[in-house]
Amino acid sequence: MTHTTDRRSILRTTGAGAAALGLSGALASCDTGGTGKARKPRTVTLTLWDYFTPANFQPVLNDLIAGIEAHVAGVRIRRRAIPFADLVNTLNLAAISGDLPDIAIVDNVSMSSLGGNGLLADLTSRVRRWGQAHAYYPGPWASCQIGGKTLGIPNNSNCLALYYNVSMLHDAGVPPPTDWDQLAATAHRLTTRNRFGLAMSAIRTEEGVFQFLPFLWQSGGDLDTFATSGRTPLAFLKKLIDRGSLSRACLGWTQEDVNARFLSRRAAMQINGPWQIPVLRKAPFDWNVVALPADKTSATCLGGENWVVMATSDHLDKAWQVLEYTQRPSVLVPYLESLGELPARRDLARAGAWTSDPVRKLFLKQLAIARPRRYGPHYADISQAVAEAEQAVLTGSVAPSTAASTAAVKIDKALG
Amino acid sequence: MSRRRTTPLAVRRHRTGYLFSLPGLVFLALLLAYPLLYNVWTSVHAVSLSSRLGGPEPFNGLANYRSVLTDPAFWRAVRVSALFTVGSLVCQFTIGFALALLFIRPFPFNGLLRSLLLMAWLLPPIVSGTLFRWMLDGDSGAYNALLRSTGLGVLTHDWLTDPSTALACVIAANIWVGVPFNMLLLLVGLHGIDPELYEAAALDGAGAWQRFRRITLPLMRPVSAAVLLLGLITTFKVFDLIFVMTGGGPVDATTVLSLYVYEVFFRFFRFSQGAAGALLLLTVPLIAAALYVRRLRHERATA
């Protein structure tokens, strides 16, 4: 034990040294700026990790950081963009080696595992004093509440909806589906030799689970009753595949792949999120979006990112000031607009570009029924069990009821 | 005359030898021995993400090994790994041998074709994996398009998302990657056989098949053994190709041991079990490497 503590303290010292070097670099650059202004009393450099890697996101984040540095006294931001799939791993490994960032923007699904492992700083009292909790949609806000503590602030939100090719539905003489029966019938009607009626992702990762959970919730089920309630959505999707309305290749598709099928008109409808809107706007055909078809109830899965502060940060106050700054409507609206993301705040629903855009408005409306994946620190095990059940059923190797009860054993164990 | 001379020459030579190999030894100790020993340490302690952040990490003996060995997913991965390795090795070696026999003969464009074949081996596995993933896609893949355009539409298939074909497809991709390597080494071996042997045999009336069976095969045995052992070591730890092509799916049809260990480590953060699994995974290439080294020594001794 002493061995590990020693090692960690050494790493921490080196980390502090590196930070100090970075800091002096930042100060030096201030000096060479030579504006003649008196230097701020104390400048700290905060590191920020996120997964906004696409090229068109970079100027937006640079603007945001410039804004932070101009308005939050004595703060410099050093940002590192890490590919989406690696961010949580990198954070976990950084926790072990002792060089965590101060602030991160993480997928809301990873809140439970990061929080459960004690990586995230408790913001409860700061948020209470701030007093703006009521401004957020309940789903995104709930995704930041772990074990009775507030561990983050929503950055932006998204959810899933049903995109459809307008002319394909028009030619077939069918309206966009609103319930499961219609979804099955419409998908069947729209399937031809060259295209499938519906495209969605059933890949063996969280992405596939993100797309599966709405079906589970719509049928009135949830993960704690998966043994009995898992059968219905699994059987429904199996039926879509058996009738040829949904390609079995969806077992290997990411949501990007799904969108590519829709764009190349190999799918008449697709389940996808608002982040595809900019790409789809360039499509040479008309498309539109409706809410996901309902079964017993309406539901969609909440996606999006949260701002978190790492528990190991030495500058919790400064980090909180940064978070607080990013949530000011005057900052948040232009920032989210240029990212093409939707706000997690109800009070901004009538503020930005999303008010005049019917597609974004539709997604915004769905946020009210979007559920967070808040299933405790062992969600990774649950997610794998669900993905494997779905894959086993859709490949036809296991019956829906068997797959559901097999998965339920693992899920119940992970739910604790 | 002087006292310095008292150290015998042999000892001084030894000392210089150790001195010269010191950088290499330090390198090995830092980058190989330390991680390996640390892995062994992790595999017999209860190490998790939260324990790493400042909890107790008690010694728990063989508990981690027990939980890996009682995990049905581990044994499924062992089975997949065995099928993958045997399937890849047999085909890579046979096709590689056949191609080597072809390329040992002079014919036009021999050099060009040989270099083109090597491309498969030079491509990063990520690239070849992505290529195969696209080509084998059920809806828009090149293979199904080819089948459809040649009137064999009935044979089209969801190659990578059907559990009964996914493993075969991954093996096929790995064979494609590994054939050039096998061919190259076997070609070198064939070049080492004295052509006079064939001439003499031909004069004595031996046919092509007899020359192959009585001369080529026996003389190629040492090279073949080396190629197969090296192949076993590289094939058993293949990760990137499968990770890109199927990610281990559908369900766990293509989850080889290396992917299983990766998931335990980086998806579930069960470091102890991951370390135990990694050490179990290591035994196979280790045995192969030991056999290979023993062969090398043997060859040197008989040479």
Image: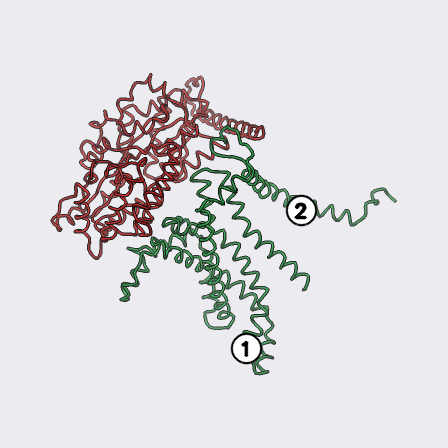
Chain colours: A red, B green
Query: Callout 2 environment at 10 Å: few (<14), some (14 to 19), or many (20+)?
Result: few
Amino acid at pointer 1: Gln
Which numbered dot is residue B21?
Answer: 2
Chain containing the residue with disc 2:
B
Quadrant of the snapshot with the C terminus of chain A? top left
Which residue does the numbered mark 1 point to in the structure image? B210
Amino acid at pointer 2: Ser
Chain containing the residue with disc 1:
B
How far across and down, in percent of the image, does residue B28 sit? 61, 44
How far across and down, in percent of the image, does residue B63 sit? 52, 39
Q: Nearer the viewer, residue A198 or B300?
A: A198
| Mark 1 vs mark 2: in front | 1
- Residue B47 placement, left or right of A248: right
Residue beneath the point at 39% across and 38% down? A380
User: Considering only order in the chain, which callout, 2 or 1, is on the residue closer to the N terminus?
Assistant: 2
Q: Is residue A166 above or below residue A129?
A: below
How far across and down, in percent of the image, does residue B245 sit? 39, 51
Give the structural element (helix, strand or loop) at label 1: helix
Quadrant of the snapshot with the N terminus of chain A? top right
Residue beneath the point at 54% across and 74% down? B212
Q: CA distance from mark 1 to mark 2?
A: 49 Å
Give the structural element (helix, strand or loop) at label 2: helix
Q: Is residue A37 above or below residue B25?
A: above
Q: Is residue B275 above or below residue B169?
A: above
